[in-house]
Amino acid sequence: MSTRDPLGYYAVLELHHEASDEQIKAAYRRRAMVLHPDRNPGRDTTEQFQALNEAFEALSDSAARAKYDTPAAAPTAPAQPPPEPIKCSACGKVSAQPRVAVYRSVRSFLLVTIRKPISGVFCSECAQKKALKASATTWLLGWWGLPWGPVYSVQALLDNMFGGTHPPLENARLLAYQAYCFHALGRHDIAFAIAEDGLKFCRKIRPTSRQAALVIERDDLDRRLKSFVAQERPNAVRLKNSWKLNRFFAFHAGAMGLVAAAITLAIVNAPLYERTFPKGPMPYSSQALAAGAITAPSASVARQMPPPPVFVRPRTAPNGKPWPMVAGYLNGEPQTRAGGHSEITIDNGQNDSDVFVKLVSLSGNIARPARQIFIPANGKFTIKSIEAGRYDVRYQDLKTGTRSRSDGLTLSETADARGIRYSVMTLTLQRARNGNMAIHDLAEDEF
């Protein structure tokens, strides 16, 4: 270093005397980005920026640099003020462990959810207060927007609870400059520890293949910090990491725990899920009676019964006899509404399970089964001689036990000169996308 000034132009540029012209230009551009007054609205760097320009003018020209490097011919330069360390943007104090930190708050207004980053250069104490304030705002205002309010609120609260985000590139730059400042002020032990922290952030920088400039800057920061650490060897001084313990962590975790406990209690104390089946078109009785023999219905029974956990196929049909081997009516069961001409074909060809089918008459005040049929897997059956009127088809899958009901069907008969015109329908028992029959789940007491 030159004896004409305490810091020297090389020190201003953070360079050695043997630095090449390209290194001088690169150092100038790097320091100019840090010290330019327009990039430092919170502090006055004008004098340091002027000193930087003066150093560059003296060293960028080969003749001027040779003159400056010659002690006998070099004029005495005025002493430069020491560099000013970066201060906390919240409290204004100088810290040996400043960090660029980002916290998030969420505000929601019905259909609008706003995520606001809270960023700055903070000491650890101010950073913890900023995180707590951001979380408090999120707790109060973040949940009231759908659908993203709750999602973004949980993300922000967890992020703030675990210390926010510390961008590695910005923190590597910050700590490199802070180490230089403490070194210039004679605090070599602290400067050494700060530079080691900066190296840790350098290792976290992960540029992509398209970020060539970022790769160059990362490598340059890493080289300068390693060179600094290699030169300065104080007596094993290590700074206690003030960012390791968040003294407000208990508040964050406690709030999250209370909410989680409240949700858990609500779930535990909630009534068990009960499957609600849609009601049929009218009160139903499983007893098939002749027309005109219908009695007044009894009080309706609640149908919010969950399905049995495991269905076991009955060994016998409702008539007490073994299930038939082929499609047909159940022997012994009444067959009513049989004085007409209409036909309904029940097609079970799309299913691999047997079904028990009921054709239910909707005539009168109570729905009652008119025919009861067994149809094997992949089979079909045609119900004939059905009187005109309103009906639906109800059936049970004998493999799974599920019960289903079709929409209402209207069968008509009309006499004309050619004879009697009557309804002929085919219903395909399937839940397939292209089935010709809309079906609904059915409660046990409506089958």
Image (spheres, rainbow, N blue to C red):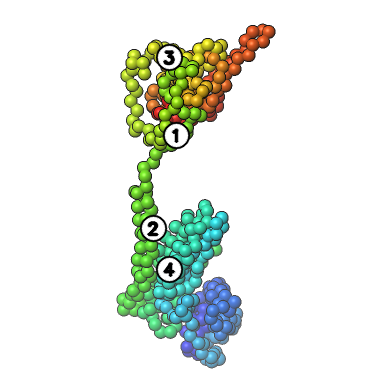
| Residue holding disc 2 | 259
In the rendering, at what x and y percent does residue 380 appear? 48, 15
- Badges 3 and 4: C-beta atoms under 8 Å apart? no
Count of numbered tags: 4
What numbered label is drawn on residue 334? 3
Closer to the N terminus: mark 1 or mark 2? 2
Q: CA distance from mark 2 to mark 3?
A: 60 Å
- For residue 172, side relative to residue 424 (left or right): left
Closer to the N terminus: mark 4 or mark 2? 4
- Badges 4 and 2: C-beta atoms under 8 Å apart? no
Mark 4: amino acid: Leu
Q: CA distance from mark 4 to mark 1?
A: 49 Å
| Residue holding disc 4 | 132
Mark 3: amino acid: Pro
Q: Give the class, few, some or many, for how many residues have Cα within 10 Å of label 2's Cα (few <14, many ≥20).
A: few
Query: Can residue 176 be seen in this snapshot?
Result: no
Which residue is nearer to you in this view: 152 or 255?
Answer: 255
What numbered label is drawn on residue 97? none
- For residue 300, side relative to residue 112 (left or right): left
Which residue is nearer to you in this view: 142 or 249?
Answer: 142
Front disc: 2 or 3: 3
Q: Looking at the image, which residue is at 51% across and 81% down? A: 12
Does residue 379 sit above or below 141 in this rendering? above
